[in-house]
Amino acid sequence: MITILTTGSPAGRAALEGLYSRIQSVDDDCRDQVAAILADVRRRGDDAILDYSRRFDAPELTLAELVISSAEMEAAYRTVDTSFLETLEVAIDRIREFHEREMEDSWLQTRPDGSIVGRLVRPVDSAGLYVPGGQGGSTPLVSSVLMNGIPAGIAGVARRVMVTPPSPDGSVSPHLLVAAREIGISEIYKAGSAWAIGALAYGSETIAPVDVIVGPGNRFVAEAKRQVAGLVRIDMIAGPSEVLIVADETANPAYIAADMLAQAEHDTQALAVVITIDALLPQRILAELNRQLGELSRAETARAALAEHGRIFVATSLEEAIELANDIAAEHLELQIGDPWSQLPHIRHAGAIFLGSHTPEAAGDYLAGPNHVLPTMGTARFASALGVETFLKKSSIISYSAAALAGDADHIRALARLEGLTAHAASVTRRLG
């Protein structure tokens, strides 16, 4: 299923190079299709949204059904069970508690000359949350609602809008609806794929445009977000899910295999990589993978992902393994080693870091608290997880007294004249009296 490679061999070096440059470019066909859809939505609004929704999702959907009604919301609460509500409450509390620490404050700095500078932190007015359908509504991605919606609420976004594709019968999973309502989202529309992103960016007769668009999706969603970026802020362009596990002789091969499979079951493009310093561990991992695959509902997807994108490397030292992990800059980095905290200071690039053998990546997906919307494809070198700051904007504050301006005037004018901007210099001179 997976070839075991040493990091110093030609094959190992080639495989590592492939991981370093794993950015995926969208194909021309997808780019052109998305551009055409976005242009259509911008031109025809609701009519375009309904046409695409009927063609790809719900054939009988009507304009009146585009908006989730209060009756649908009430029915959703009657459908979900008590145990789901209890789990939802725990997840909401954990995620909210973590993200409340991210909130930024406005600040001012007063100088001796009387000038005042600072920063004013304000939320955007509106945010759109894209939530994938999850296999036609049969696997509702509740965690996406929480991870995107809760930070926006903490930021103070007044209008939070959720879009999600309907099932063929025109319904939306009651679990998604209840999750949205429990975190204060009541404006929900039945729209998916690129036309939903177009609706959020450009607006339609029914859906008002937003300032920020966040949330995961397939390649058409990702490409649509890329094409509207600039008109609105987006969280990131996400690629396939990925995990990198650094392991030593203390690691449990059953745990490693389980976490590799947890990534591989997402889709056939998912990336699961192990770098170990124990030469005996790879074969034990392979044995566990073969044993555990038979227990999965998505075994064929996981098997295909591992065969195509699974990697197991044997490194010469823990130091080399950590440095390779930094070079790969994975979305999820697990340190299944004897003393993971000792290596944390050496980690420079990772979307999220999971320390110790009892910290599966799945805990971060659902309940630990930190956001699971993370940079992929090596972009953890410069990008961060989605958070409250995604929904905040900062304005600079500047106030000069007459004395302060007089004190800075020569310096301001010198720089303005150097740049050939004489009107800039004159605007200072005219105030000096």
Image (spheres, helix red, strand yellow):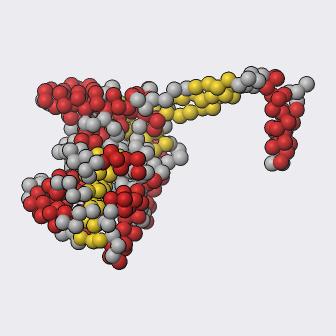
- Residue visible at 46% across and 36% down? 389
User: Toward the viewer: 284 or 172?
Assistant: 284
Residue 318, can we see it? yes
282 w.r.t. 352: above or below = below
Question: Picture quarter containing residue 25?
Answer: bottom left
Residue 186, can we see it? no
In the rendered image, residue 232, in percent from the top left (x then y), is placed at 50, 42
User: Toward the viewer: 358 or 211?
Assistant: 358
244 w.r.t. 119: above or below = below
Lateral position of residue 299 relative to residue 60, left or right: left
Question: Picture quarter containing residue 157?
Answer: top left
| Residue at the limit of the structure toward the right, as seen here | 433
63 w.r.t. 264: above or below = above
In the rendered image, residue 420, in percent from the top left (x then y), is placed at 83, 48
Q: For the N terminus, which image quadrant?
A: bottom left
Q: Tell me how many marks there are.
A: 0
In the rendered image, residue 190, in percent from the top left (x then y), is placed at 30, 39
In the rendered image, residue 297, in percent from the top left (x then y), is placed at 12, 53
Q: For the C terminus, which image quadrant?
A: top right
- Residue visible at 17% across and 27% down? 86
| Residue at the limit of the structure toward the bottom, as seen here | 10
Lateral position of residue 198 relative to residue 300, left or right: right
- Residue visible at 14% across and 63% down? 284
- Residue visible at 30% across and 40% down? 144
